[in-house]
Amino acid sequence: MSDYYTVKKVELPTKSQIEEKRALLHAEHLDYFYGDFWSIYIEKDSRCYLEFDVGHLATKFITREISKEDYESLKSDKALFKIISRKVR
């Protein structure tokens, strides 16, 4: 190994730790769902939101309001993410 680089040991969170953190983030929401670098949730006032990464490697997230129909369709089919996210950009 080169003198210029050192390997650091990193502890990744467990699945239960991730789920616990997500539950805390969404404690005020009626429902939520996660995809790859995006999430959707419903606020207490029944408004639906899509939060997604527009940066590089999850560095910049934006939140946009979406319709209830888009929320339900995205929750049942993750493949619709590109179509729905383009509608709200």
Image: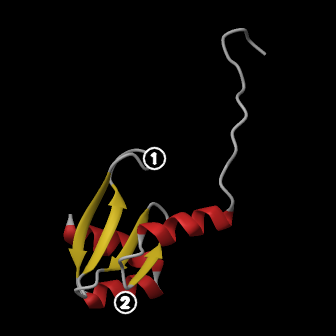
Horizontally, residue 16 falls left or right of residue 61, namely right
Is 71 left, or right, of 14 in this rendering?
left
Question: Mark 2 touching mark 1, by CB under 8 A?
Answer: no
Residue 29 circle label: none
Q: Residue at x 45, y 60 (%)?
A: 37
Q: Quadrant of the N terminus?
A: top right
- Return the disc, 2 or 1, that comes first in the chain's sequence: 1
- Residue 85 visible? The answer is yes
Which residue is disc 2 drawn over? 72
**The quadrant where residue 16 appears:** bottom right
| Residue 7 at x, y percent in the picture | 72, 26
Rendered residue at 31%/71% (across/down): 50
Dot 2 crowding, Cα within 10 Å, few <14, some 14–19, many 20+ = few
Which residue ends up furthest to the right in the rendered image?
A: 1
Check disc 2 and report its element: helix, strand or loop: helix
Kindly tell me whether residue 35 is visible in this rendering.
no
Q: Nearer the viewer, residue 15 or 58?
A: 15
Image disc number at residue 57: 1
Report the front residue among 31 and 68: 31
Q: Where residue 48 sits: x, y (%)?
A: 27, 81
Kindly identify the amino acid type of the residue bearing the numbered disc 1: Leu
- Neighbour tally class for label 1: few under 14, some 14-19, many 20 plus, Cα within 10 Å: few
Residue at 70% x, 20% y: name it.
Answer: 6
Q: How is the image coloured?
A: secondary structure
Q: How many numbered discs, if any?
A: 2
- The disc labelled 2 sits on which kind of residue? Glu
The quarter of the picture where residue 51 lies is bottom left
Dividing the picture into quarters, in which one does residue 52 lie?
bottom left
Q: What separation in Å lies between label 2 and label 1 (alpha carbons)?
A: 26 Å
Residue displayed at 26% across by 64% down: 63
